[in-house]
Image: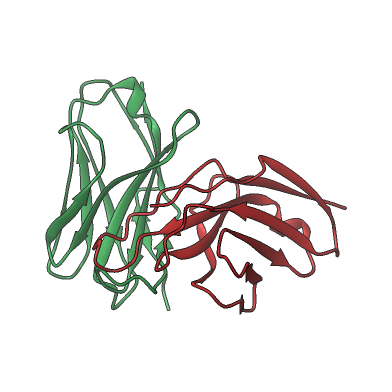
Chain colours: A red, B green
Amino acid sequence: DAKTTQPPSMDCAEGRAANLPCNHSTISGNEYVYWYRQIHSQGPQYIIHGLKNNETNEMASLIITEDRKSSTLILPHATLRDTAVYYCIVRAPWGAGSYQLTFGKGTKLSVIP
Amino acid sequence: KAGVTQTPRYLIKTRGQQVTLSCSPISGHRSVSWYQQTPGQGLQFLFEYFSETQRNKGNFPGRFSGRQFSNSRSEMNVSTLELGDSALYLCASSLAYGVANTEAFFGQGTRLTVV
């Protein structure tokens, strides 16, 4: 799977948008970008994933650059409950078979009141 | 619908003992993966099961094993426990095996402490 690079930590004011960047410059054309988050001592929570197009769901938006070398996860109105470690993962496509997720160190997002 | 259920939530074992952890996936999900999380190594993939067969295995010693039953429930076993096995063990379920465009859902984990 392609390697990802994320800033180790970020702060965001409550109520503002949180923009979490991820660099995946070696991504292959058929690899997906996944985002998970982990609130302290809980299991990781799926947020969103995408291939080429921008995606939006009830939790967040995912913006993938046209060259697919980077992406940004956007939490539109951050709350204190969004304080967590956010993981950007590039996942091998079908054919590799496994659903193995390779977690990096992620970004520790702190939402400040 | 119910999420991924892991039991027990907390466990304390003595070095040298063995332990069995259980995972019940989301109803209808047939693939189960296991991960170990420690402060030093982060989240690391242990193994994945689908249709009662281990499909993929991470870089862990043979003391770590698992199995999946016909109802998709899975267990993992660690024999001859070492202090370094103290960790949060997480189970994730997904709908099927080998499907790229699908997500995995994690349980709350089992916190294992080896003393």
- Relative placement, left or right, of B65 versus A59 is left
Q: Is the residue B105 above or below the residue A84 in the image? A: below
Q: Nearer the viewer, residue A5 or B68?
A: A5
Q: Nearer the viewer, residue B92 or A70?
A: A70
Q: Residue furthest front?
A: A67
- Relative placement, left or right, of B35 versus A50 is left
Residue at 56%, 58% (x, y): give it: A69
In which quadrant is the N terminus of chain B drawn? bottom left
Q: Is the residue B6 above or below the residue B63 in the image? A: below
- Relative placement, left or right, of A94 versus A105 is left
x and y percent of residue A55 in the render?
60, 77
Q: Is the residue B25 above or below the residue A22 in the image? A: below
- Relative placement, left or right, of B108 versus A38 is left
In which quadrant is the C terminus of chain B drawn? top left
Residue at 66%, 63% (x, y): give it: A73
Q: Nearer the viewer, residue B23 or A12?
A: A12
Residue at 14%, 67% (x, y): give it: B51
Count of numbered labels shown in the rendering: 0
x and y percent of residue A44 in the render?
50, 55
x and y percent of residue A43 in the render?
48, 53
x and y percent of residue A81 in the render?
71, 58
Residue at 37%, 61% (x, y): give it: B5
